[in-house]
Image: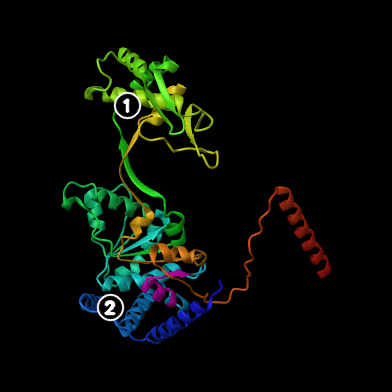
Amino acid sequence: MKQNLDDRKIVKEYREIARQIVKKEDLYQNMDQEELIKQTKIWRSKFDSQEMTLRDRINSFALVREAAKRVVGLEAVIVQLIGALVLGDGKIAEMKTGEGKTLVSLFVMYIEVIRGNRVHLVTANEYLARRDREEIGQVLEYLGISVALNTAGLDKEQKKAIYTADVIYGTTSEFGFDYLRDNMVRVYEDKVQTGLDFVLIDEADSILIDEARTPLLISDRKEEDLTLYFKANELVETMLKDDYEIDEHKRLVWLNDAGIEKAERFWQVDSLYSAENQPLLRITMLLLRAYFLMQKDKDYVVLEEEVLIVDPHTGRALPGRRFNDGLHQAIEAKEGVDVHEESRTLATITVQNYFRMYQKISGMTGTAKTEEEEFRQIYGLDVVVIPTNLRVNREDMPDDVFYTKKRKKAVQLSMKFRGAMLKDNRH
């Protein structure tokens, strides 16, 4: 893990503060749990109305360090304290795997709670959230701070209880869906989230960059008579060229007078365009689009009795993706496969936009420097590379990219032969 000049300068400043924290290790050794909880209460009351000084920060870190040593038997080293200071200043801390990022999170969560903020810690999956809540959460509880785990499948009252906690562990999707559900309630009292104060994100590059454009959405099934698609299919199969017109450039198709008369006779209505017949008109037009604008094996394919969209850029089928507004159902009717109900989006937000609503955000990961510019432009976050506690002798080489498998195999055989030669020479 290489540091640039700016990182070394920043880390040097934080290192001095970290050393002062370690020097305070005797300050709380003789205090029992009740005294530590009392100190936490004093700070929560104090910093609710005034800013925390550097001295306060050092003392609070020293207290947490003592609690962690008692409860989980872990004593934070200098580089872990540096990482915690970086997170506390609203930055991304890049720390190698195995350097103890989970313990690092403890310090910044404690600081934010005594400042009066509710803390959301986001992990990559529910297993990690549960594990970290059990391991690190017990240290926070030892200091009188309430901790909860946000999981799926809970009712409204259980969710409300969770969001009263000072620190809440959970996944991106669960926090995001709670936000979406809150924006769908009819009365304010049904909301469960209590504000978006501070979020600390584990594996920040994966969640904030890789998954950033992934939409979280809540949908339901649109209730409609699916047999109408098959009936409309029978109508469109009888259509002649004189019944419709096409603008291929604008990808439009519409009925002319002859087509309208044919459709009205088929549906047995006086006027296809009257208000009460709008559902029939809509489905008729969808089948026209399916037949005359959507091409099989170009816009979509049929695999194992299922209609799949084709990505226009890559030419690959996209399982799980569907055309919207009834077009997919129309194509299914055209191809003679089962017509599935259409999903209707009720609420949606991207991961990126959700996290940008928090008042303060920081994160930790093993790989962040390569995405530093994106972190800065999208979230206003700087990345600081934290040195390892012990020197790493392994040298990470750049990736090798091969144009063909044949070339890759040839290089591998060459390396294997070279390794064998070196081994023989040593003997």
User: In terms of image quadrants, where is residue 358?
Assistant: bottom left
Which image quarter holds the N terminus? bottom right
Whether residue 171 is visible here, answered yes or no, is no
Residue 20 lies left or right of residue 368; in this view the side is: left
Magenta stretch?
82-94
Residue position for label 1: 282
The chosen color scheme is rainbow
For the residue labelled by badge 1, is the local secondary structure a helix, a strand or a loop? helix
Residue position for label 2: 36
Give the Cα separation between the discs numbered 1 and 2: 68 Å
How many marks the image carries: the answer is 2
**88 in magenta:** yes
Image coords of residue 278 (percent x, y): 27, 25
Mark 2 or mark 1, which is nearer the start of the sequence? Answer: 2
Whether residue 264 is visible here, answered yes or no, is yes
For the residue labelled by badge 2, is the local secondary structure a helix, a strand or a loop? helix
Which residue shows up at 44% across the image and 22% down it? Answer: 334
Which image quarter holds the C terminus? bottom right
Please tell me whether residue 40 is drawn above or below residue 181 in the rendered image: below
Which residue shows up at 26% across the image and 79% down it? Answer: 51
**355 in magenta:** no
Q: Amino acid at mark 2?
A: Leu
Residue 37 lies left or right of residue 77; in this view the side is: left
User: In terms of image quadrants, where is residue 359?
Assistant: bottom left
Q: Amino acid at mark 1?
A: Arg
Image coords of residue 91 (percent x, y): 40, 70
